[in-house]
Amino acid sequence: MSLLSVRDLSLRIHDTPVLSSVGFDIAPGDIFGLVGESGSGKSMTALAIMGLLPHGAAMSGKADFCGQNLVGLPEKRLTRLRGNDIGMIFQEPMTALNPMKTIGDQVAETLLIHRAATRSVARSAAAERLARVGLSSDRFPLSRYPHELSGGQRQRVAIAMAIALRPKLLIADEPTTALDVTTQAQILDLLTGLTAAEGMALMLITHDLAVVAGRTTHTAVMQRGRIVEQGETRSLFRQHRHDYTRRLFAASAHQPARRARDSGRPLLTAENVVREYTLPRPSFFAAHSRLRAVDGVSLTIRGGESLGLVGESGCGKSTLTRAILGLDPLQGGAIHLGGVKVAAGRRVPRELRARVQVVFQDPYGSFNPRHRVHRLVAEPFHLTGAPADLRGRVGAALSEVGLEPADMDKYIHEFSGGQRQRIAIARALIIRPDLIVLDEAVSALDVRVRAQVLDLLARLQESHGLAYLFISHDLSVVRSVTDRVLVMRAGRIVEEGATESVFTDPRHPYTRALIAAAPVIPEDWKEVAHASR
């Protein structure tokens, strides 16, 4: 018997087809995976089930949940179902949570809205639910606000809200995309554990095939609003009969064609770098304590080399990056670029700053949406002076990253996530720097777009002799695109060496724990799939 049975679900928004004849079943206690590229319709399927569609949406078909069809159900009845019988966890917890409310109030709000408890009982239930997801009130008081928590902790709050009323179905939409591997493993273990303990069914939406491998009972593959293949997860992974499924698998295991390059000359060096922050006083008369975010870190990047920097959230990767970019002052040590000292936290000479550019994790957030692409890509020229053929240089940069010169007259919202990241790379490349810092530059991209961007980066490195500092929590990406890797924990480098050596023979327990936490597709599943082609 199915808990949720979807048949011929179709959706049009302003007469544009979004979903077409979608159908699947989720049984009680089932963990169902829905995978596909960005824009394939995964999230819209979940929103259609929840009745959370934008203005201009027209839906047909059937979504039978516990004997009632959710399609066409009045809003009042859908409101009673949301949170009560169907819970949903959104991809980005910081935007899903209310920054003006404490975490205790937000979890309790679900119970109050559904009149399942008085305010005092709701607060007690909120504390119990937060403890259930690993946020006990002795360490994480109900009075904390979302901005006072890490990304993984905020996601746990979102889970606590979703399970507050013990729903029958929990929908998790990309719940671990931006999390490091150990936090990702903890969240996935938490979700699967809650499913078993609470007797729920779980619908896990992701673009990462390794996330659903070994965790879901059934999986469906979605492309352009249609489900092209579905079945028992192990069988689907071993056979993947549809061409699109095969392409997804190939992209997930893709390694860009590149060769190690090392000029032998140090381009950037950091020696015993220390970065400390002053923390608030615990009481009025107490002294300020200090947090050492970067603790005596030394590293070298040579010309044309790719260096990976990995570690959990909060280990100091981004703080070290800000110091390398000259944005944060140091309390010890020194950084040199091309033999010239970088006065971190002070005014860095333009000609020195022009030698290093950066590509951020969220390209949309790093661009001004009011400006056209032409102006966005040309921004780094303020360091070197604008050339006479500015539009020609911008067009050439866009062509190098696989876009059209005519795209320079568009706005950033007119592009997909992968195209925006290509524009961010064009911006970093346009003044021909020696080093590009890639801060989680592909973590939010689906597997096929990620493969395309990694190929692009490898090609640009070969043609321009670029050096990369690749910061990522995705160990498979770091393994495929770097020559050497540094492993960072609690502000210190705990292991370093040639990338393949570190991954095949990790010496530090923390490195071994990181590698063990990374989601992988079992090798025996891959072997059968290759043999069946």
Image (cartoon, rainbow, N blue to C red):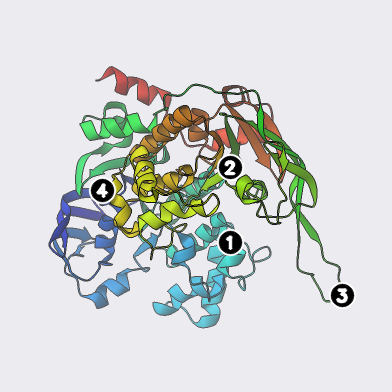
Q: Which of marks 2 and 4 is nearer the N terminus?
A: 4
Query: Which quarter of the picture shows residue 168?
Result: bottom left
Q: Do the residues labelled 1 and 2 touch (CB within 8 Å)?
A: no
**Residue type pointed to by label 1:** Ala
Please give the residue where the numbered disc 2 appears in the rendered image: 355
Q: Quadrant of the C terminus?
A: top left
Q: Label 2 to label 4, Cα distance in Å? A: 39 Å
Residues marked 3 and 4 touching at CB (< 8 Å): no
Q: Is residue 445 visible?
A: no
Cα–Cα span, label 1 and label 3: 32 Å
Give 50 or 321, whichever is nearer the viewer.
321
Q: Which of marks 1 and 2 is nearer the N terminus?
A: 1
Q: In this view, does 156 lie above or below 320?
A: below
Q: Callout 2, which amino acid? A: Arg
Q: Position of residue 406 (x, y in %)?
A: 27, 49
Report the residue at 29% width, 17% height from top: 531
Identify the residue under disc 3: 285
Relative depth, front residue between 435 and 103: 435
Task: Give the alpha-carbon distance from disc 1 to disc 4, as whole Å.
Answer: 36 Å
Q: Which numbered tag is attached to residue 40?
A: 4
In this picture, residue 18 sits left or right of residue 137: left
> Mark 1 sits on what residue?
131
The x, y position of residue 514, in whole percent, is: 59, 37
Which one is in front in this view, the residue at disc 2 or the one at disc 4? 2
Q: Is residue 488 visible?
A: yes
Q: Which of marks 1 and 4 is nearer the N terminus?
A: 4
Amino acid type at image mark 3: Phe
Is tag 1's residue or tag 3's residue first in the polypeptide sequence?
A: 1
Circle 4: residue type: Ser
Task: Residue at 37%, 38% (x, y): give it.
Answer: 400
Residue 188 versus residue 287 in the image, above or below: above
- Given residues 369 and 184, the one toward you in this image is 369
